[in-house]
Amino acid sequence: MELKKIEALHQSCVEKITDHDLGAFLRICPPKEQSKGPLAGMSFGISDEICTRGVETTAGSRLLAGFIPPYQSTAVARLEDAGALILGKTNVDEFALGDTLSSAPQKTIHPLHKGYTPGGSAGGGAVAVASGQAQGAIASDVGGGVRIPSAICGIVGFIPTYGRISRFGVIEHAPSLNQVGIMAQKVEDIKKIYGVVAGHDPLDSTSLPNEVSPPVNLRGLRVGIINQVEQDKMEKAGQDLVNLTGCSLAQLDVEYPTYAEVVFHYIAAAEASSTLGTYDGVRFGHRVPGCEDIREMFSKTRAGGFTTYSKSMILLGTYILTGDRYEKYYLKALKARTGIIEEFKRLWRDCDVLITPTVPTTKVSYGDDVALRKYTAACNLAGLPAMTLPYGKKDGFPFGLQIIAPQGKEHLLLDLGAALERSGVNG
Amino acid sequence: LTITAETLRQLGEIVYLDLTGEEMEEILPKLREIIGQGDLLPQLDGIEPTRHITPLESVLRKDQVGLSLSKEAVLMNGPEIEDGFFLVPRILED
């Protein structure tokens, strides 16, 4: 596309962003020449924990104010190579740690219900897509960071198997849990974007080798439903899938939702206590001036930079890694993580995909202390692909239907989701 | 057994976070609640802990010279730079 046309497209997108005034974007990227490719002309928001060469990237933290990455994250490089128009950096909880945007640098407003949070951590990206400011967004999903705000805002949010999308250039707090995810209004768009950003990356040591997905026969699919969870909604979703695809249903007893979020908290906090040690005011970002010695500089810089929420996670992680608490909390959580992986392996004997609600509630006010990762965190703990789809409403708010598949079977989610979307069936 | 204000203050020192009294009051009950939820974890004996989900082992790049960031690019984000070095306050005691 010619630079003139790109500038015009960019300008119209920026006008949309200004008109909406929902606080989805933290800053706008300058327009630049685009490649021809499958995403040509498609506009994107990039969550602020994903590095964009030459454009300030703060991971939503004061500690990285003014940080200009000298390199490009692989995911953004692949989007640009495919012709995507990168519009700007979207709002996110500090270091993608939260789930309600309460630790984000600015307030982002729910596009449908002004007084409520769009959820986090990647609430900026979800609002950008839901309100039509961008056609796609990418962000970190550590315990639900992509799926939670997508469900709350009524859009599609997808994460592939851990290692399918490169994490190179992603500023993160819990590397063993982070799966880069995609947000869009339609599953077909997710498919197109995923086809571009996925694939082996030698710059990420956890990147999986490329694999070709086998064709999917939805007719023979077995869909699992958890007993006693949002029974009416889930049974209707299951029946809709049966009617649409001819798949079969399996009612299953599942234990992990009762403790997965605790396991997630302990492991994420332990990893954060290590990874967030990097932010000390020496090599980049914010530094408190005028300190007498290095200890004072570290303490004042970090204390003034991190939000209270991030501090609490660092302190929790340090607490459970110290002394005999290591065994009592951290090691126990790591074993419980194995337990969750084993439980999923047992579930896959009885079903090919599992459907659950994405979040226990979508009606969340700013400042509410709610546990939103009950159904999402287990996927990160087990490295599974998952997708949330808008499926009707609950209490007047969008209801997100989550579909989970075994590792390497993201094509099942994409095909099943596309079938549901094409049918127009809505819970 | 639960976390005390004194333990929290000591942890703050370990991780270089000076906590204000207000922060202590906000953080302490939240940590107590999360730590209390440890009782929900199942007691799984004879099971290996999972630290990482990837099946990959010892991924090493080829030992060959390649392009890297220039010194200028590495230093460009430093809050204080002098003669090609990151400048920091005094490290050694008198």
Image (cartoon, rainbow, N blue to C red):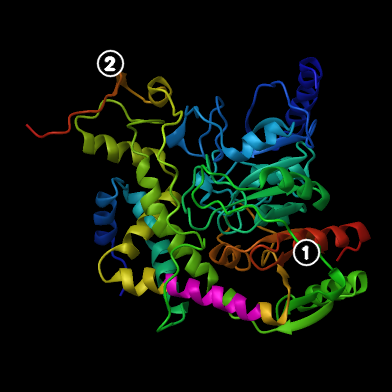
Q: Which residue is drawn at 54% across and 71% down?
A: A260
Chain part drawn in magenta: A333-347
Q: Which residue is drawn at 48% across and 57% down?
A: A176
Q: Depth check: A262 or A420 in front?
A: A420
Residue A65: x and y in percent read: 47, 30
The chain to which mark 1 is attached is A
Residue A353 vs residue A419: left or right?
A: left
Hey, what amino acid is under mark 2? Asp
Disc assigned to residue A275: none
Q: In which quarter of the image is the C terminus of chain A?
A: bottom right
Q: Depth check: A376 or B76 in front?
A: B76
Place residue B94 in its image quadrant.
top left
Q: Which residue is drawn at 56% across and 39% down?
A: A50
Q: Which is closer to the viewer, label 1 or label 2?
A: 2
Disc assigned to residue A395: 1
Residue A347 vs residue A323: left or right?
A: right
Magenta region, mostly helix, strand or loop? Answer: helix
Number of other residues with Cα within 10 Å of mark 2, as a class: few under 14, some 14 to 19, many 20 or more? few
Residue A318 vs residue A59: left or right?
A: left
